[in-house]
Image: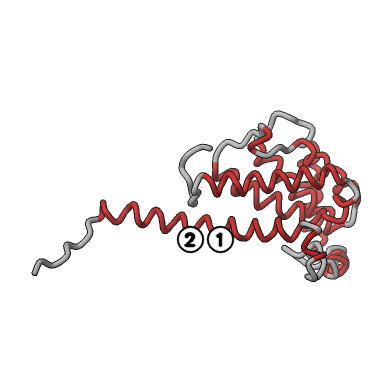
């Protein structure tokens, strides 16, 4: 009776790559898909509790406590630094021809500044950045699949922190959700695994 041969490294490599795709991409896609489904109004009609935002980094009830803490030392200096970074992001947001991943990062920073300071100006600036951000199917300037992963995470956080303000702007809310969907769809269809090492 002939014994089965041990698989060579060359034979194992494709299986390992497939496993990396399955264990790397599928949880991301499942998480984003669950997030998108939770955004829909149909979930409330199905008997599940209505969505609440923010939930990803902090709860709504946490914001006043954090804001109060940021008025005292040593957190006061941290708030000043956050405001300087947000002001820089607001200036950068006026430049239209920038990589989409940078726009998503600036939107997250501005949304975070709004949440922690309560200054509505940051929410307006974040909304301006989101207005100029486009998903891959809409011609957005996404340099690589790795940028899309970073952009999807930053965009999801931005949406979560700004959701109450976006509700009043239905077109911008729909555009932001569409960009999130397009990023998740592109990553799923490309069988993405981190880091990709290739452009989209």
Cβ–Cβ below 8 Å for labels 2 and 1? yes
Q: Report the front residue among 7 and 125.
A: 7
* The N terminus, quarter of image: bottom left
- SS for dot 1: helix
- Colour mapping used in the image: secondary structure
Q: Where is 112 relative to 65, above or below?
A: above
Q: Tell me residue 194's x, y (percent).
A: 49, 51
Left-right relation of 56 to 64:
left
**Quarter-wise, where is residue 68 in the image?**
bottom right
**Quarter-wise, where is residue 64 in the image?**
bottom right
Q: Report the front residue among 119 and 33.
A: 33
Q: CA distance from mark 2 to mark 1?
A: 7 Å
Neighbourhood count class around disc 2 (C-alpha, 10 Å): few under 14, some 14–19, many 20 upward = few
Neighbourhood count class around disc 1 (C-alpha, 10 Å): few under 14, some 14–19, many 20 upward = few
Residue 69 in view, yes or no:
no
Q: Where is 87 relative to 72, above or below?
A: above
Q: Residue at x 69, y 59 (%)?
A: 35
Q: Tell me residue 24's x, y (percent).
A: 50, 57
Q: Where is 172 relative to 61, above or below?
A: above
Q: Residue at x 29, y 56 (%)?
A: 12
Furthest-front residue in this view: 46
Q: Tell me residue 121's x, y (percent).
A: 90, 46
Q: Report the front residue among 2 and 141.
A: 2
Instruction: Determine which residue is flagged by label 1.
Output: 27
Which mark identifies residue 23?
Answer: 2
Residue 137 in view, yes or no:
yes
Which mark identifies residue 128?
Answer: none
- SS for dot 2: helix
Q: Residue at x 90, y 52 (%)?
A: 119
Q: Tell me residue 18's x, y (percent).
A: 41, 54
Left-right relation of 4 to 28:
left
């Amino acid at each position: 009776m002939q014994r089965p041969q041990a698989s060579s490294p060359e034979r194992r490599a494709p299986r390992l790559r497939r496993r990396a795709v399955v264990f790397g991409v599928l949880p991301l896609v499942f998480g984003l898909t669950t997030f998108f489904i939770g955004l829909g109004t149909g979930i409330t009609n199905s008997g599940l509790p209505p969505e609440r935002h923010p939930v990803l980094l902090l709860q709504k009830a946490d914001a006043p406590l954090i804001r109060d803490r940021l008025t005292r030392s040593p957190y006061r200096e941290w708030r000043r630094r956050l405001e300087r970074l947000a002001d820089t992001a607001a200036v950068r947001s006026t430049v239209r021809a920038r990589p989409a991943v940078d726009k998503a990062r600036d939107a997250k920073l501005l949304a975070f500044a709004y949440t922690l300071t309560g200054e509505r100006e940051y929410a307006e600036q974040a909304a301006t950045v989101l207005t100029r951000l486009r998903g891959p199917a809409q011609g957005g300037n996404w340099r690589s699949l790795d940028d899309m992963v970073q952009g999807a995470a930053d965009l999801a956080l931005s949406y979560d922190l700004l959701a109450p303000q976006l509700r009043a702007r239905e077109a911008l809310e729909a555009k932001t959700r569409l960009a999130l969907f397009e990023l998740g769809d592109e990553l799923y269809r490309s069988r993405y695994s981190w880091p990709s090492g290739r452009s989209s």
